[in-house]
Image (tube, helix red, strand yellow):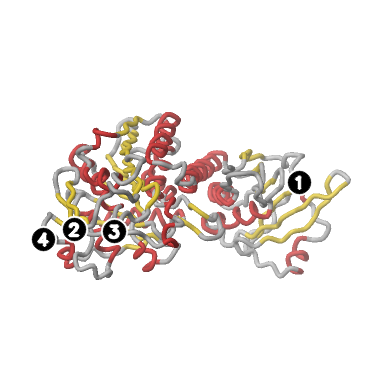
Amino acid sequence: METTPVLSGPRTAGPAPEADLVAVPFGPGPTLPAVPWAELPVPADALLAQYEAKGEPGEVVETTAPRDGGLRRVLLYGVGDGSPGALRRAGAAVARRARRRASLSVVVPTVEGATAPLVEGALLASYSFTIGDGRAGKPVREIVFVGGDERELRRGEALARATALARDLVNTPASVKTPAWLADRAVEVAAGAGLDVRVWAGPELDEFGGIRAVGQGSVNPPRLVRLSYTPENPRAHVVLAGKGITFDSGGLSLKPTEGMKTMKTDMAGGAAVIAAMSALADFEVPVRVTGLVACAENSISGSAQRPGDVIRQYGGRTVEVLNTDAEGRLVLADALAYADAELDPDVVIDVATLTGAAKIALGPAIAALYSTDEELAAGLAGAGEATGERLWRMPLVDDYRAMLDSDVADLANVDRAMSGSAGSILAALFLREFAGGRPWAHLDIAGPARAGSDEGEITKGGTGFGVRLLLRYLTA
């Protein structure tokens, strides 16, 4: 099991002598920097012209240069317009070309603010999660960044490591990742990051009817985790609530086999919350942040909840469960109601792989954003653009609220007509009922939380989506 490689640098002199691969930037505007140890056998302009290289981000031209009587591989990598997105893509391309190598030296472009996104892209593209030793294509073991800004390098490293933590949590098989396991990992993160932590289990969860109902069919009982970060003189209090369904069979409203294959990742929202909390001190976040992760396994047994059951959420509101596969909103409703009643936050944000409808609407690269507050929505959307974790604002259609009315309870967990339409909007409207009228945002990350292939800094499997945008928003 491997995550990001060892990080060194930045350095102002040449690369480590043992580095067997050197990467030098070029682009439509910037020329190649003067690096004596990367002298090429032919003029750089002629080489790039031969390959018809345009300097686009992700473009790599490979050549060789003299090295101590031998040869060294040199990668000329395009940086495009030098924007953060282009630099992340450039770093990712270089790191992937260095797979199975012992070391890589990367010359940082002379573009303001280049270091952090370049580091971020290189490290995230080097992420690997394996169980066993037989997999080919292992990442480069060490990356040295030559030049650049030390503080920005550490910032890029911190973002990458937090995202890698979320990916590790998401990619861990459900045979290991029980609710108790996930709660234990959160406790470990709290110890390492200086956070306060509390875990509810067993009878302590009696008031949390949604979490209990979803978890009651599994031999692995549920948990609720609270992580707390309090800086000096906090400007505000933000609550992050994450869905922590460690495996989702759909319950008695059983998913098809194909739909279950990726359901070890159904706790990606909870992973994003835990990972973001792990890095708050690194970024000197100026607000108080409380992270809530509602952990349960949605399984099948004689004790599983049934369609038609009525449960009592935290705070007393009753819900008719018409579909047990709409379970994420039940555990999040408890977390939101608890936050409203006990934590008095200024802002509440929940993150969840909540609906397939969001993925159908927006595809695999963009998450759905719902919010009751314009400033909050704008801040999150801006953070998503800056980090490459894009959000699209979706409507909270009040006329649809009546579709969640129940004949026997305060509301139903899905459209009582079971029409199958507006699924993502209805899920958001359900959650809004428990936010207490506070500034609230819901991020439905069902599409971008997992990837089927490598692309840029994204790696196949859990992507860690949401970690970087949350840290950006909280820092700002």
Nearer the N terminus, badge 4 or badge 2? 4
Nearer the N terminus, badge 4 or badge 3? 3
Real-space Cα distance between discs 4 and 1? 70 Å
Real-space Cα distance between discs 4 and 3? 27 Å
Real-space Cα distance between discs 3 and 2? 20 Å
- Lateral position of residue 125 relative to residue 252, left or right: right
297 versus 453 height, above or below = above
Residue that label 1 marks: 20
Q: Which mark is residue 370?
A: 3
The type of residue carrying mark 3 is Tyr
Q: Which structural element holds mark 4?
A: loop
Real-space Cα distance between discs 1 and 3? 48 Å
Tell me whether the residue at label 4 lies in contact with that at label 3, contact meaning CB atoms closer than 8 angstroms. no
Q: Nearer the viewer, mark 2 or mark 1?
A: 2
Q: Which mark is residue 412?
A: 2
Name the spot of residue 20 as percent of width and height, x first. Answer: 76, 46
The type of residue carrying mark 1 is Asp
Residue that label 4 marks: 407
Crowding near pointer 2: few (<14 within 10 Å), some, many (20+)? many
Tell me whether the residue at label 3 lies in contact with that at label 2, contact meaning CB atoms closer than 8 angstroms. no
The type of residue carrying mark 4 is Asp
439 versus 161 height, above or below = below
Crowding near pointer 4: few (<14 within 10 Å), some, many (20+)? few
Real-space Cα distance between discs 2 and 1? 61 Å
Q: Which structural element holds mark 1?
A: loop
The type of residue carrying mark 2 is Ala
Q: Which structural element holds mark 2?
A: strand
Residue at point 54%, 47% (across, down): 116
Residue at point 41%, 50% (across, down): 268
